[in-house]
Image: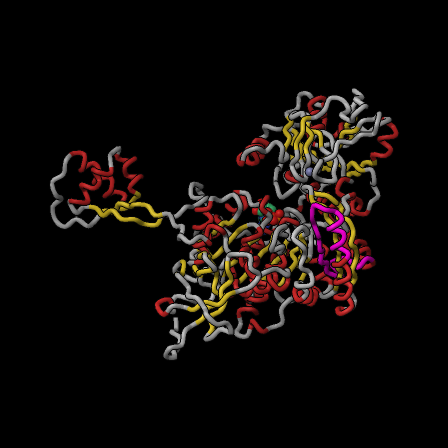
């Protein structure tokens, strides 16, 4: 580092974002002995009141507007942990998502890295030293031991103890004789260390893939040119890769990454947590485990141990892993310089963080790409309305892979009108005769079936037909779900559990017949066991997945043909590839249509398309049965025809009319508290403030306050004010400026959600 010019008596000042919720930054003096190690992004320990707290230096200054500054106590880590590009992103997050600097900062460093201790695992290693001349005299035991060390050259002490069946005292004897050294050394934890990965070569691309790759590569070339940072962004460097499931998107990502590496730049690949399977990771590791562009591939997701996460992160920070694959938070990986960011399944809601800072990793990927001169590829079979809108507005380039690799046909989708079924059957059956017949046929041919219902439990409500009693959660405004195996009523919002009654619990009623309404996966499973007694049926939802391995185990059993019918919630809808699945049934397609959210139609379309994509991924053509009570709903009909642009065209009209995203942006302000009156009172005040703000902004709509779709959750009442505006950046700034006026009393909390993904 260049040393700073020093004026005599002049002290360097560091501005620090603390790890405590104080909504502001503080200035500290840098002690002279730390001047060479304090930079922007350095993690430091500082005094704060009576305490000592950790923080991150965000600026190094020559002077401070404040007097009586205290001194930094120490720095943490050899390198600045937050790199300048990530610091810039932190500022962007705080501004745009309207949150405190320490909240934004919290997101970018994993806890495993934030700790004061450096977190590396040090182990004692035994190393063979060069022997000059004759070996010293050794006992038989010592000779055996020496032979092992001599062969391995270097190995952990514990390992050697185990291998040689000896004690560390014996090994110390070899050290005394000058044959080995024993010293602490860092040993890395590799979450995939035990897997043997066979290297792969790039595949020969088809015409569509070639065209897609070419666009991305020329964007990277343009960005890499001097002044590349100043060229116009957007349309030139952000791409929507719209490709049906199995169209070879991943192969395009892999080859684009290779080009980035050739230019000396790294890449980040974001995937939804649920599709971050060992197979996905392996595809990337296998491609880059060898050859001229060989590099480590770091993996970041929530199932890593703290130690593993620490080591993976530092592999990136040290530049040894130039490719990162991970879930949402991997968007903050300190890859430098960054050449490419891929966001797979970009429409996925899991990219949105549902706690502060409420960022969307897909959107941050685009921001990072623009800030750091990297190309960005957003991939999906069912792009979000937002991304496709950006294509229409020429902000993103469109790359299309309209066909499956090897031209495997899209599955035939049949929509079954359950209204006429219900009329004919006098009551609602779980399986229509068509679906039942189709299941039988597939089972006969030894093919596999997946059935999908987005609701777990046995039935979604318990009612007394006599007095009208409905079992409701004491904490939330929802009815309790009946789980038969457990004989319990459960709240799917707050987790409240109670024993299921056998007669109506309403005082004075006590009616012995209780009605269970609405259908869940547990009941489907039971109906399958009854209707198809010879089939091997397995259910997969968060009730049946008790341990971490369960997910992998059930899928493994399905893959190897130990299960005939897999029934489950959306968990089975995503990204899985089973060639022998030829039939997919959607039991109740309307469920997601009725959620009180302007994205209900979009979600349903995406879900149906994704689920349908599970069928017929092998040699046999697949078919899909969609059971619905609103069979002519556009979301269902366009999904049936695999017609994305048809869906988009009609949906965008609806959004335009109501001024919803992507035509406008939304800020959702939710107030919550235990007293409904207090919440309502403050909500009215909030509305007035927002009206004023909307007048200043112009072209902005304020709605509410209205009870949240889920009025009461976890015993808190919730009211919402929704703002729709074409210019969110300005709105965010004005909201931040209004912080004072929006100070809530202690018993009411205000949550600001910019670009919310759920309205509940
Ligand atoms: P997507 O990511 O769009 O679902 P994948 O990249 O996983 O698609 O491709 C689906 C399958 O097709 C994979 O097994 C992949 O190895 C194979 N594949 C992709 N591109 C090609 C190609 N150009 N030639 C042959 N096989 C390919
Ligand atoms: Zn509840």
Residue 218 seen from this side: no
Q: In the rendered image, which quarter contains the N terminus? A: bottom left
Q: Nearer the viewer, residue 725 or 334?
A: 725
Q: Quadrant of residue 659?
A: bottom right
Identify the residue at horizontal 18%, vertical 37% (top origin): 142
Q: Nearer the viewer, residue 640 or 317?
A: 317
Answer with left or right where residue 682 lies relative to residue 297: right
Magenta-span inclusion, residue 624: no
Identify the residue at horizontal 67%, vertical 50% (top origin): 747
Identify the residue at horizontal 48%, vertical 61% (top origin): 56
Answer with left or right where residue 133 lies relative to residue 400: left
Bounds of the magenta span?
Answer: 658-684
Number of on-image labels: 0
Magenta-span inclusion, residue 682: yes
Question: Quadrant holding ligand 2?
Answer: top right
In the image, residue 695 lies at what x, y percent? Answer: 78, 68
Answer above or below: position of 540 versus 726. above
* Rendered image coloring scheme: secondary structure
Residue 379 seen from this side: yes
Q: Quadrant of residue 36?
A: bottom left
In the image, residue 295 lies at what x, y percent? Answer: 44, 55
């Amino acid at each position: 580092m260049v040393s700073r010019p020093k004026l005599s008596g002049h002290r360097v000042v560091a501005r620090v974002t603390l790890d405590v919720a104080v909504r502001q930054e503080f200035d500290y003096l840098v002690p002279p002995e730390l001047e060479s190690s304090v930079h922007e992004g350095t993690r430091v320990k500082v005094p704060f009141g009576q305490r000592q707290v950790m923080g991150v230096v965000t600026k190094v200054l020559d002077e401070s507007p404040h007097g009586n500054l205290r001194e930094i106590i120490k720095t943490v880590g050899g390198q600045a942990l937050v790199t300048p590009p990530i610091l810039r992103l932190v500022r962007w997050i705080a501004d745009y998502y309207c949150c405190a600097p320490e909240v934004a900062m919290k997101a970018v460093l994993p806890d495993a890295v934030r700790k004061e201790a450096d977190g590396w695992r040090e182990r004692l290693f035994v190393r063979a030293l060069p022997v000059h001349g004759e070996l010293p005299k050794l006992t038989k035991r010592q000779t055996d031991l020496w032979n092992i060390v001599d062969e391995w050259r270097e190995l952990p002490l514990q390992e050697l103890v185990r291998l040689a069946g000896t004690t560390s005292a014996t090994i110390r004897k070899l050290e005394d004789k000058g044959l080995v050294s024993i010293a602490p050394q860092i040993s890395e934890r590799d979450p995939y260390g035990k897997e043997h990965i066979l290297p792969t070569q790039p595949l020969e691309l088809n015409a569509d893939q070639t065209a897609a790759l070419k666009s991305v590569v020329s964007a990277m070339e343009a960005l890499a040119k001097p002044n590349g940072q100043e060229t116009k962004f957007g349309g030139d460097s952000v791409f929507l890769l719209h490709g049906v499931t199995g169209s070879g998107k991943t192969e395009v990502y892999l080859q684009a990454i290779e080009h980035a590496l050739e230019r000396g730049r790294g890449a980040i690949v974001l995937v939804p947590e649920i599709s971050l399977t060992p197979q996905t990771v392996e595809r990337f590791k296998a491609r880059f485990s060898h050859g001229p562009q060989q590099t480590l591939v770091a993996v970041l997701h929530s199932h890593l141990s703290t130690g593993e996460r620490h080591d993976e992160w530092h592999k990136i920070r040290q530049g040894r892993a130039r490719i990162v694959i991970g879930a949402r938070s991997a968007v903050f990986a300190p890859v430098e310089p960054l050449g490419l960011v891929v966001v797979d399944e970009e429409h996925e809601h899991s990219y949105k963080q549902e706690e502060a800072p409420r960022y969307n990793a897909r959107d941050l990927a685009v921001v990072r790409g623009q800030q750091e001169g990297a190309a960005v590829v957003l991939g999906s079979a069912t792009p979000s309305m937002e991304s496709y809108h950006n294509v229409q507005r020429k902000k993103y380039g469109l790359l299309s892979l309209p066909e499956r690799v090897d031209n495997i046909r899209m599955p035939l989708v049949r929509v079954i009108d359950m209204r006429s079924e219900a009329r004919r059957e006098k009551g609602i059956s779980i399986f229509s005769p068509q679906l039942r017949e189709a299941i039988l046929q597939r089972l006969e041919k030894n093919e596999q079936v997946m059935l999908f219902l987005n609701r777990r439990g046995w039935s979604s409500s318990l009612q007394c037909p006599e007095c009208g009693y409905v079992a409701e959660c004491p904490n939330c405004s929802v009815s309790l779900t009946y789980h038969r195996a457990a004989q319990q009523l459960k709240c799917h919002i707050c987790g409240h559990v109670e024993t299921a009654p056998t007669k109506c619990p309403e005082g004075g009623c006590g009616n012995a017949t209780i009605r269970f309404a609405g259908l869940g996966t547990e009941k489907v499973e039971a109906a399958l066991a009854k209707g198809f007694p010879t089939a091997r049926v397995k259910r997969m939802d968060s009730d049946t997945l008790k341990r971490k391995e369960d997910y992998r185990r059930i899928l493994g059993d399905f893959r190897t043909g130990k299960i005939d019918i897999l029934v489950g919630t959306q968990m089975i809808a995503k990204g899985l590839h089973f060639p022998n699945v030829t039939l997919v049934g959607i039991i109740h397609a309307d469920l997601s249509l009725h959620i009180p959210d302007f994205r209900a139609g979009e979600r349903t379309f995406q879900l149906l398309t994704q689920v349908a994509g599970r069928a017929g991924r092998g040699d046999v053509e697949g078919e899909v049965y969609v059971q619905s009570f609103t069979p002519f709903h556009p979301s269902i009909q366009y999904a049936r025809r695999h017609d994305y642009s048809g869906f988009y065209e009609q949906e965008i009209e609806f959004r335009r009319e109501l001024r919803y995203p992507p035509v406008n942006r939304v800020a959702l302000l939710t107030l919550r508290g235990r007293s409904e009156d207090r919440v309502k009172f403050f909500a009215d005040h909030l509305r007035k403030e927002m009206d004023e703000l909307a007048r200043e902004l112009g072209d902005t709509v304020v709605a509410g306050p209205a009870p949240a779709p889920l009025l009461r959750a976890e015993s808190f009442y919730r009211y919402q004010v929704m703002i729709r505006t074409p210019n969110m950046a300005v709105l965010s700034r004005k909201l931040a400026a209004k912080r004072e006026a929006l100070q809530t009393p202690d018993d009411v909390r205000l949550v600001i959600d910019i670009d919310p993904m759920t309205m509940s």
